Each structure stands twice: as structure tokens, then as C-alpha cells.
Amino acid sequence: MQSDTKQKKETSMAQKLTQRFEEELEVIGNALSKKGGTKKLEKVWERIGRVKEKHARASGQYKVEVDHDNQGTATKLHWK
């Protein structure tokens, strides 16, 4: 049985991890609409993979999807 303070600490750490994971996904998503940003579908998935690897504890709770056009250019990033 965990003490209340330890439980609060664990909850806080988990929230920070998920927040950082989402922030990095937002950076990737924002790059899709910026000049010079990564837009090739395979490169976007590589960036997502690196972020998932970096935040392995948090990434398992998310499903990430990338919309793309016929030329293999990513158009939108969303997650649940």
C-alpha cells in the first residue's frame, strides 16, 4: 500500500510525462503547416517513432494517426 504523498508524486510524474509527449506531438503537427517543416509521410512517422521511444511510458496510452495526400505528404496529425 502506497502512502498518499507517494501516490500524489506518481500521479504528478505520469501527468508530466503525458504532457511532454503531447507537446512534442504538437511540435510535429505544427511543422506540417510551416515552411521548411517536415512533411514527407515517412519522415513524419520517423519523428513520431522517436518521440514514442523517448516517452515510452506515456506513448502506450495514445493512438497516433497521420492524414496524408496522394503524393505522400502528411497533412494533419491527431491522437487520442
Image (tube, rainbow, N blue to C red):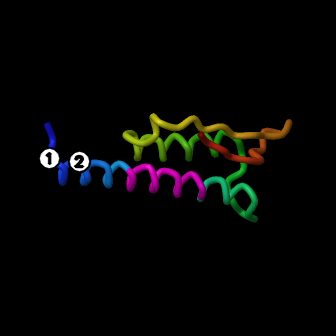
Residue 3: numbered disc = 1
At 57% across and 42% down in the image, what residue appears? 46
Q: Quadrant of the C terminus?
A: top right
Is 43 left, or right, of 73 in this rendering? left
Which stretch appears magenta?
15-26
Relative to 9, say whether 58 is above or below: above
Task: Count every numbered label the image shows and give the total.
Answer: 2
Quarter assignment of residue 67? top right
Image location of residue 47, percent across then percent down: 56, 47
Q: Is residue 16 left or right of residue 38?
A: left
Could you tell me how far apart the alpha carbons at marks 2 and 1 are, in whole angstroms?
Answer: 6 Å
**Which residue is depicted at the point 46% across and 55% down?**
19
Three-letter code, disc 1: Ser
- Give whichever of 23, 80 is nearer the camera: 80
**Residue 7 circle label:** 2
Query: Do the residues bearing badges 2 and 1 touch, measured as CB atoms within 8 Å?
Result: yes
Secondary structure that dominates the magenta span? helix
| Other-residue count near label 1 (Cα within 10 Å), few / some / many at <14 / 14–19 / ≥20 | few
Residue type indicated by callout 2: Gln
Q: Is residue 20 magenta?
A: yes
Looking at this view, is 2 or 58 the one in front?
2
